Image: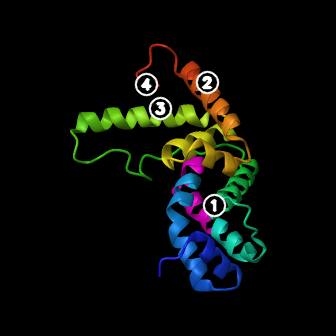
């Protein structure tokens, strides 16, 4: 049975647990990825992702279709939980290189080291940005969402997202400096 998200959401809001399971399967990877890149920690990402879906399951009966994808609602829940998580922590976590494979094992060892160092450097730069700009970078480059989709998730117009994107890239360029190995 190939149902649309809207049909599955309707069934889930009527109490169909299998329908909610389908929504979970369709969205778990994207939501986990978003949460992981915002927290930088596998364990916290797993915990917060579980809380996103628990909250969604508890409130699916109150979900109102406003003409935006169901996933936008999930991203909004995730965004709010992450904001609370950051507020509750006194310092930000850095991504442990042992938590995630950052490079392909098929490459030469020296290429792996260089790519790992570049990714680590880039993640440190991104973590210096305000939360809204980190969210933008993750949604744009990790989840490959369009400006319109990001606008729906963040509650901004597509034009505002384009402007924020431009300012974010300028900020990254400023942080990186002229002589760095990154080309944006």
Near mark 1 (Cα within 10 A), the count class, few <14, some 14-19 or many ≥20, is some
The residue most toward the right is 62
The residue tagged with tag 1: helix, strand or loop? Answer: loop
Near mark 4 (Cα within 10 A), the count class, few <14, some 14-19 or many ≥20, is few
Near mark 3 (Cα within 10 A), the count class, few <14, some 14-19 or many ≥20, is some
Spatial CA distance of label 3 from label 4 is: 10 Å
> Which numbered disc flags the more N-terminal residue, 2 or 3?
3
Mark 2 or mark 1: which is in front? 1
Spatial CA distance of label 4 from label 1 is: 34 Å
- Residue pointed to by mark 2: 171
- Residue pointed to by mark 3: 121
> Which numbered disc flags the more N-terminal residue, 1 or 3?
1
Is residue 45 in the magenta section? yes
Residue 30 at what x, y percent from top left? 52, 58
Spatial CA distance of label 2 from label 1 is: 30 Å
Disc 2 and disc 3 in contact, CB within 8 angstroms: no
């Amino acid at each position: 049975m190939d149902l649309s998200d809207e049909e599955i959401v309707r069934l889930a809001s009527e109490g169909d647990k299998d329908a909610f399971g389908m929504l979970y399967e369709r969205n778990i990877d994207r939501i986990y990825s978003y949460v992981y890149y915002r927290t930088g920690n596998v364990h916290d990402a797993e915990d917060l992702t579980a809380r996103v879906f628990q909250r969604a399951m508890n409130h699916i009966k109150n979900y109102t279709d406003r003409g935006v994808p169901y996933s936008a609602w999930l991203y909004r829940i995730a965004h709010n939980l992450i904001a609370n998580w950051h507020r509750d922590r006194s310092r930000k976590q850095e991504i442990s290189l042992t938590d995630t494979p950052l490079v392909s094992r098929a490459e030469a060892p020296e290429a792996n080291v260089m790519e790992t160092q570049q990714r680590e450097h880039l993640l440190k730069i991104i973590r210096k940005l305000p939360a809204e700009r980190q969210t933008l970078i993750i949604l744009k480059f990790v989840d490959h969402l369009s400006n319109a989709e990001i606008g729906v998730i963040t509650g901004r117009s597509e034009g505002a997202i384009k402007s924020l994107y431009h300012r974010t890239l300028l900020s990254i360029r400023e942080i990186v400096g002229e002589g760095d190995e990154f080309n944006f």
